Image: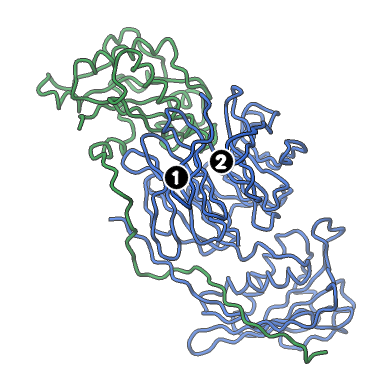
Chain colours: A green, B blue
Amino acid sequence: MRKYFLIFAVAIALVSVGCAKKKVVTEPAVKQPEQAKTQTQPAPAPKAPASEEGVKTQPENTSQVAKATPPSTEETEIKNARFQDVHFDFDRYDVKENDKPGLKNVADWLGKHPDAKLMIEGNCDERGTAEYNLALGEKRANSVKEYLVALGIPADRLETISYGKEKPICTEHNESCWYKNRRAHMIAVKKG
Amino acid sequence: MRTLILISAAFLMLTGLLLPAPAGAKIYIDISSPERKLPIAISPLNGPMGAEIAKVVSSDLDYTGLFVLLGEKGFSERPYEPFNRDNWLATSVICVMKGNVSLNGEGRLDARVSLYDVQSGKELYRKRYQAPEALIRPIGHAIADDVYRELTGTKSAFRARLAFVTQKHGIRDINLADWDGQRARPIGLMDRLVMTPRWSRDGNSLLYSSERRGRWSVYLLDLKTLREKLIYTGRGTNLAGDIDAQGDIVFSSSAGGNQDIYLYRASDGKVERLTRTSGIDVSPSFSPDGKKIVFISDRSGSPQIYLMDLNGYNTVRLSFKGSYNTCPSWSPQGDRLVFAGRYQGRNQIFTMKPDGSDTVMLTDTGSNEDPAFSPDGRFIVFTSYRDGYSAVYVMRANGEGQKRISPPGVRAFGGRWSPN
């Protein structure tokens, strides 16, 4: 019996780490030079006190735009522009009535600043699952975009991106925090 | 400048000595319906690091839930003593693994392992394993795989690799590890945001989504050459997806103004849009037979699981229980889907048949999501928030044996085992 032993050798590649470094082949150029910087920062705190963030749009807040310094050039104005976040209900992406006056102000501001375009970032709270939240955040950003388009802003001045639940501005596990994270955040950048 | 750590292939040489198998070799335990756990003894190998190797073997076999491992105190035979059935007949053990290991001057381990049947006293298999000392754990996994195959007649998941994402100081990377999460090392992507690593069917590439310069794009990384190929980009949110045996890729994109499912054909690089709803369509993956795509859609008003043909037709809804079902993933045999369903305000891991019937809930601690089966279908890897931060967890496909396998204290998620 034993003379029928089969002998064979199998080589199995096991991935292991060497210490050499190697460059990755980069993708074909996709130019969006100025936006990268604005994306990286977590949303700057709005000018309103932090405690008011959880409160819905402030009615007395007539302008959505805060100017840190007296107007100098349009470029500075674009850089310093701050817009109130648009908030959403859980697993919803429709713009609510109380956020519409604020978006009207955003549209007015864009009308006065033709060199500016808007990056709209959609965000979600932690309760949804990660991948679905990226799609949901995109829908939220898109809802804001569509509303601004309806107000007369050309679509090519409005870009959207979703961060899903990947970039929360609040990390506690309660509704006040979830509310803050269910938002579309808008950042003005210079065109071109 | 983006750099990747070079991944070199090291070789573990296995020389097998297969004893002549009678027609229809004996299956010691039927894994499809184990009547009771099979008692076995895994003896420390005789020689340097013999105990460590045996520990890896024991840990793998024990985690299957199919075996009872005799504790070393019950051993009536020393590691250096040759196998003698008389020493084991008084125990409950059915099979015994024994072996010798040596370490040569160049730091190479040379292990010779045998598996014996106690009742007959016969040697069931004998094999030689040679590899650098650093690969001690892979040697253990290779031995465990052989022992498992001998006893069950099927391949194990012990030699699979695990890909998962970690985040440290706002920087993310995909890590590659052994199947049990050990020996994890980053591949060097160093992205701020990277998501959803998915293995190609041959285990040589990883598909993933990454946000760079304000855009989400779908990339395919060849793990041998480290060439990263841009599969799809555009304004908005473009997310992997899955890759089939031909290299065709399904992904979701907001390119059409709305999140929809698209198919990228490897043959000509063309992209075809498969869904056209006004709502969200996301998280597509190919069925194991390559004939269907499962995905998530909120066309009914809440996210639910749907199935469609490769051309986007014949769409049927699969999930009806609950108002939030996401993250569907196939079993390798195509007989189950695993997914995350919302239950009492949290996401939990469920499985069901691909027709939507026979739903079973597997987790109930914390919030859990992003599940996927092991290549042998016996385990599920998932992301859990039960420790207060996201971590990669594993369990048996019936929900038993839940444990974290990503490093403690490190934010980790998106675990996926390689298909081989």
Mark linked to residue B270: 1
Occupied quadrant, residue B7? bottom left
**Local crowd size for mark 2, using a 10 Å CA cut-off: few (<14), some (14–19), many (≥20):** many
> Residue B124, image x and y in percent?
79, 79
Task: Give left or right: position of B71 versus B3.
Answer: right
- Host chain of mark 2: B
In the current view of this chain or complex, which residue is farthest to the left?
A72
> Residue A142, image x and y in percent?
41, 24
- Host chain of mark 1: B
Occupied quadrant, residue B162? bottom right
Occupied quadrant, residue A192? top left
Mark earlier in primary sequence (1, 2): 1
Residue type at mark 2 is: Pro
Mark linked to residue B284: 2
What residue do we see at 33% from left, 19% from top? Answer: A84
What residue do we see at 58% from left, 71% from top? Answer: B138
> Residue A171, image x and y in percent?
45, 34
Q: Nearer the viewer, residue B180 or A25?
A: A25
- Element type at marker 1? loop
Residue type at mark 1 is: Lys
Cα distance in 3D space between marks 1 and 2: 18 Å
Foreground mark, 1 or 2, reads: 1
**Local crowd size for mark 1, using a 10 Å CA cut-off: few (<14), some (14–19), many (≥20):** few
Q: Is residue B384 visible?
A: no
